Image (tube, grey):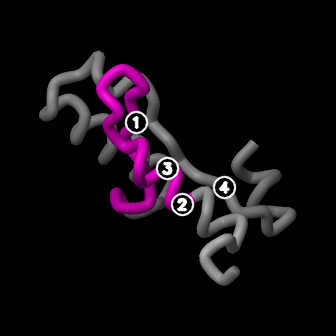
Amino acid sequence: MVKWLEGHELPYLLILTKSDKLSKTQQQKRLTAICALMNRENSSAILFSSKTKLGRDRVLQEIMNLLDWNNE
């Protein structure tokens, strides 16, 4: 899926859900491992939990940026 999005030059967000299921240490290890696998910087991925609201504001902001709503 990611290769298809990149091949078509479409923007996407890398959101790691269910982060509340992991300890802070496990979250960082998982984030680092996934980003390394995808050849991305850790800051490009978002840890997210609907239960704790972790990452909610950043996801909303990134969606607004992708939709270019900030320029209106």
Going by the numbered disc 2, the residue's amino acid type is: Glu
- Disc 3 marks which residue? 59
Q: Is residue 16 left or right of residue 52?
A: right
Q: Residue at x 29, y 16 (%)?
A: 21
Instruction: Examine the rendered structure and indicate whether residue 27 appears above or below residue 12.
Output: above
- Disc 2 marks which residue? 62
Q: Which residue is drawn at 60% across and 69% down?
A: 65
Part of the protein shown in magenta: 42-62
Going by the numbered disc 4, the residue's amino acid type is: Tyr
Q: Which residue lies furthest to the right in this view?
A: 8
Q: Which mark is residue 12?
A: 4
Residue 8 drawn at (x, y percent): 86, 64
- Element carrying mark 4: loop
Q: Which residue is drawn at 50% across and 42% down?
A: 15
Instruction: Examine the rendered structure and indicate whether residue 25 appears above or below residue 65.
Output: above
The reply to whether the magenta stretch includes residue 61 is yes
Residue 26 drawn at (x, y percent): 20, 29
Q: Residue 48 carries which label?
A: 1
Answer yes or no: do the residues labelled 4 and 1 have beta carbons within 8 Å? no
Q: Distance between the residues labelled 2 and 1?
A: 13 Å
Q: Residues within 10 Å of mark 2 (few under 14, many from 20)?
A: some
Answer yes or no: do the residues labelled 3 and 2 have beta carbons within 8 Å? yes
**Earlier-in-chain disc, 2 versus 1:** 1
